[in-house]
Amino acid sequence: MSHIALITLVVRDYDEAIAFYTDALGFELVEDTDRGDGSRWVVVRPRGTGTASLLLARAKNDAERASVGAQTGGRVGFFLYTEDFAADHARMTAAGVRFLEEPRHEVYGSVAVFQDLYGNRWDLLQPA
């Protein structure tokens, strides 16, 4: 096995999730295929990377709807690396991304925690 290809993220609605990840975070939409049963195969990933992507899966029952935004129990569960922390932080802030703290400069790099549109916590991180 060479790498993790997809990580499922349960969302309320495909289109609002696509809009957030592509517009606010700057991801690219890799695939959006109608599966014929009311569901879609929706894949997004950071632009210019061929690494792990997110499979946006619409919640289809009460248990899945209850997990939207809480898939990691309130902890930071996703780590978005950047090569230009200041520029990406400014761009994301201007796009309405909610940062939960001011940027910090730690020994391991520059970091700030933000929430996606559902409340999942992410680190924006530029390694030192």
Image (spheres, rainbow, N blue to C red):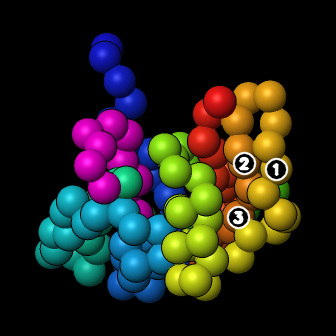
Residue 71 at x, y percent in the picture = 67, 55
Task: Look at the image and give the residue range highlighted in magenta.
Answer: 47-56
Disc 1 secondary structure class: strand
Mark 1 burial class by Cα count in 10 Å: few <14, some 14-19, many 20+? few
Q: CA distance from mark 3 to mark 2?
A: 10 Å
Is 51 in the magenta? yes
Residue 56 at x, y percent in the picture = 40, 64
- Decide: is 107 above or below 57: above
Q: Confirm or deny contact between disc 2 and disc 1 (CB under 8 A).
A: yes
Mark 3 burial class by Cα count in 10 Å: few <14, some 14-19, many 20+? many
- Tell me if I can see residue 78 in this picture: no
Disc assigned to residue 47: none
Q: Is residue 102 left or right of residue 95?
A: right
Instruction: State the residue in front, 23 or 93.
Output: 93
Count of numbered circles on the image: 3
Q: Earlier in the sequence, mark 3 or mark 1?
A: 1
Disc assigned to residue 114: 3
Q: Nearer the viewer, mark 3 or mark 2?
A: 2
Residue 50 at x, y percent in the picture = 26, 39
The residue at 63%/77% (across/down) is 93
Amino acid, disc 3: Phe
Q: Quadrant of residue 55?
A: bottom left
Name the residue carrying label 2: 111
Q: Is residue 5 left or right of residue 32?
A: right
Q: Quadrant of the C terminus?
A: top right
Name the residue carrying label 1: 104
Instruction: State the residue in front, 68 or 36.
Output: 68
Disc 3 secondary structure class: strand
The residue at 16%/69% (across/down) is 33
Disc 2 secondary structure class: strand
Q: Nearer the viewer, mark 3 or mark 1?
A: 1
Q: Quadrant of the N terminus?
A: top left
